[in-house]
Amino acid sequence: MNQHDFDKLLEKYLAGLCTEEEEIFIHQWSERLLQNSDFQMNTFEKKRFEQKLWQRIQRTLFPRQPYKIYALWTSLAGVACLLVVLFTFLWQSPSTDILPTNAQEISNASGEIEVRNTSAKPQQIKLEDGSLIVLKPQSSISYPAHFNDKNRAVYLQGEAFFQVKRNPSKPFIVHTKDLVTEVLGTSFNIKSYEQSKAIEVSVVTGRVSVYENSIKNEKRKNGVILSPNQKILFDKETKKLVPSLVENPIVINTPVTTLDFVFEETPLASVLSRLQSAYQIEFVIENHQLAKCAFTADLNELPLHKQLDLICKALDATYEQRGTVIFINGTGCQ
């Protein structure tokens, strides 16, 4: 992603127009930069400075005078820096500091905390262990004020994105009405609305265990292990878990150097091997005669399905997704 594209993404984020994958990218970007942050202020100072930062960002992105529009993109690099500072205060503040005025936090006598997002926008909650929850609109989540020594259990109704702080000795467990999702440290999304006929769990990083919340057979659970770019749909009526791929897979395995998707007379087997390494998705060539067919193209900055469309068009082949695997088929090359 070049600077121009990143600037456009920042503008979308501030306007609340980002997709789920784009929001995840911004959160991960800010988290990496915040690791080197040394800012320290009390709560009152944070609030005042936060307000000033947002005012400056808004003035930069949305100037009142039309003739100043030409300066918008040259100013966004500075906005990126301002966002880092702003994220610092939001990240280091207690969870109650980042709750909106239209989100309800309720504590009961047993020490349980329930947060209900009644707004139209996702809201962030930071737990005591450092894990981050992005609670989607019309959703609620409950959790103990202090986790026990065995696990970190939360209870979700609706939809939320989780970025879990790794702790191998204390698994992070998300309970919905019909499913249990268990992780040690990863990022994933759960969609479990009461009125919906299915529950969806999708993984961004790491691996998660998803199994049916049932006491009928404690020794044998109906469940699956999900890896990045994979998801499952659980039908509430049939109790079936159907594994699949997320709609728009993202690059997972990014080396220190920029990932290169430029191919020149490269055998198809090598092309798919590079894609498999990047996306952590399994590819199968059904006709072995296709494996050595040479492919030449620049696939950089293209989404996975577009990359596959171009590959198959060049080699007179087709691809089909079956569960979490993509199969490539064709007559081969001369």
Image (tube, helix red, strand yellow):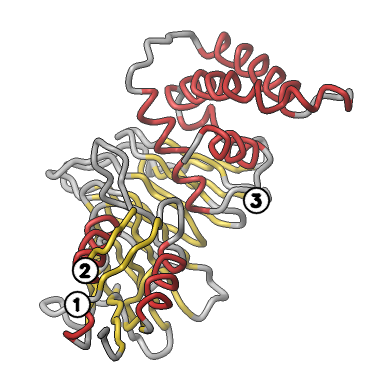
The quadrant in which the C terminus is found is bottom left
**Which amino acid type corresponds to the residue marked 2 in the rendered image?**
Pro
Q: How far apart in space, not on screen, are marks 2 and 3 (Cα)?
A: 53 Å
Q: Which mark is residue 47?
A: none
Using the image, determine if residue 193 lies above or below residue 49. below
Q: Which of marks 2 and 3 is in front?
A: 2
Image location (x, y in percent) of residue 8: 62, 39
Q: Position of residue 94 (x, y in %)?
A: 45, 26
Taking the view exactly as shown, the residue that stands out farthest to the front is 334
Of the numbered discs 3 and 1, the one sitting upstream in the chain is 3
Q: Are marks 2 and 1 in contact (CB under 8 Å)?
A: yes
Label 2 residue SS: strand
Q: Nearer the viewer, residue 81 or 147?
A: 81
User: For mark 2, what is the residue?
Assistant: 267
Nearer mark to the viewer, of 3 and 1: 1
- Residue under label 1, please give it: 291
Q: Is 289 placed left or right of 15 in the picture? A: left
* Residue for point 49% across, 61% down: 157
